[in-house]
Amino acid sequence: MEIQEFIKKVEEIYDSLPEWIKESLNNLEITVEERDSGYLLGLYRGIPLMKRGIGYNFVLPDKIVLYKYEIEKVATLENISVEEKIRKVLLHEIGHYLGYNEEKLRELGGY
């Protein structure tokens, strides 16, 4: 799939998220890159929401990066749609934005 089509799918999936999730996202940029140098499907960079203090202002947006190639590859290996894998990875990275670590995400079914 071309990267523009993948980006459109990410936008559609984001738009379909429950309002309470979207309303909790603040100062966050979601981007797509063709591929990661390793095996990551997605990456959250920033200060998790639960760790932001009163002085958290005038800062660059936190960032979620989704890696197109890796998501497509794993979706094929897991025999699920690319859209389903995008949704899972996006929700996983949003979990990190909200302050959840890998262990807590596993407990919540974020894998």
Image: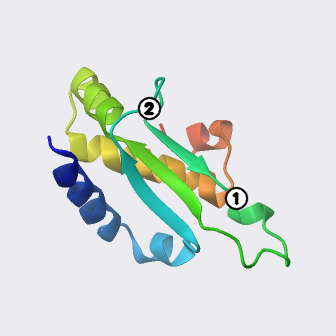
* Residue 19, horizontal then vertical, whole percent: 42, 77
Residue occupied by mark 2: 36
Q: Position of residue 92 (x, y in %)?
A: 50, 47
Q: First in sequence: mark 1 or mark 2?
A: 2
> x%, y% of residue 74?
31, 27
97 with respect to 56 (left or right) = left
Residue 45: in sight, yes or no? yes
The residue shown at (85%, 78%) is 54
Q: Is residue 93 above or below residue 71?
A: below
Q: Amino acid at mark 2?
A: Asp
Tell me the amino acid under the disc marked 1.
Answer: Pro
- Whether the residues at callouts 1 and 2 have beta carbons within 8 Å, the answer is no
- In the picture provided, is 83 more to the left or to the right than 67? left
| Occupied quadrant, residue 85 | top left
Q: Which mark is residue 48?
A: 1
Q: Nearer the viewer, mark 1 or mark 2?
A: 2
Does 109 sit above or below residue 28?
A: above
Measured as percent of width and height from the top left, residue 55 is found at 85, 76
Q: Quadrant of the N terminus?
A: top left
The residue that appears at 35% across and 30% down in the rendered structure is 70
Left/right placement of residue 68 relative to residue 18 reads: left
